[in-house]
Image (spheres, rainbow, N blue to C red):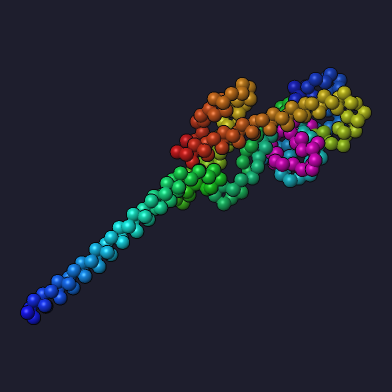
Amino acid sequence: MEMLLMGACLSMFGLAVCCLAFGAATRDSETTATAAPAVEAEMIKAVASPARFFVQPPALPMAARSRVPIEALLLQIENHVRLEHAAAECFLESPNPSLLHSRTISTLVN
Amino acid sequence: MVDIDLLKGLTPEDAERVLALGKRVVLTTGAELFHLGDTADSVYVVARGRLRLTLPMQVRSHEEDILVEERSSGQTVGWSALIPPYRFTLTASAPLETEVIALPREALTNYFAAHHDTGYTLTLNLSSVIGHRLQLFQAMWLREIQRMVELRCA
């Protein structure tokens, strides 16, 4: 009789532990399920946010930037200005969108 | 006489009279005609040689004068002298020996007051010079914005 009662108590205890474990597991999955769309929405919002034109682009490593001698860089800038000037003159002679956005061979931007 | 954009439409005699108001200035190679922010008292016509118009720009933490435009024989420089607040908005220097005719604002405005037709023609010519610069830089600015947009959306 004692053995039977002990078995019944252990069974009840095991059942209680199982119920608690099941409850805990169910709560976690529900929380995750409700949190997931929010995270996803945040990610979509971040990806879909408009480009900001006046934000500085990521800086190049210092070594890469200083590789070009400053004299060469100044010449590149000057050459770029001359090419852009010429492109703008062409546009003014015959104003149309394709001439306004014609490609440049400037090494500063290519 | 070289073909001068400021004097287009004037008779040779009228053009000579306007040029007689000015003073010829010879710039040696590398000499500066005016500096950004200086008081602008005279308009300049390039008689021979070339002028570099520059603006300061930070390049690797150093201030460098960057070419914005070049002016050669017959072209007008320094129209800030006729437009308030009479301050130069660029720096002009000579990359080679250059001769300019400096036309003082006071002499010009006095002459225009007495010779309305000449004043009218010169004002139209000046508007054309200013308008061309505006359109040119508008197009250049838009091209840069377009590139920036392409870079951002790439």
Quick one: A105 or B124, which is closer to the camera?
A: B124
Of residues A4 and B18, the one nearer the viewer is A4
Query: What residue is at 76 percent from the left and 35 percent from the top?
Result: B79
Is A80 a magenta residue? no
State whether residue A49 is above or below residue B52: below
Identify the residue shown where x is 73% and y is 31%: B130
Eyeballing the image, is A35 above or below A49?
below
Please tell me which residue is depicted at 64% across the width and 34% down the height of the picture.
Answer: B137
Q: Position of residue A28 (x, y in %)?
A: 31, 61
Region in magenta:
B76-101
- Where's the C terminus of chain B, which quadrant? top left
In the drawing, does residue A57 fall left or right of residue A35? right
Whether residue B9 is visible, yes or no, is yes
Quarter where residue A12 is shown:
bottom left
Tell me what residue is drawn at x 15 percent, y 76 percent. Answer: A9
For this orientation, the residue located farthest to the front is A1
Q: Is residue B88 magenta?
A: yes
User: Relative to residue A36, is residue B14 depicted above or below?
Assistant: above
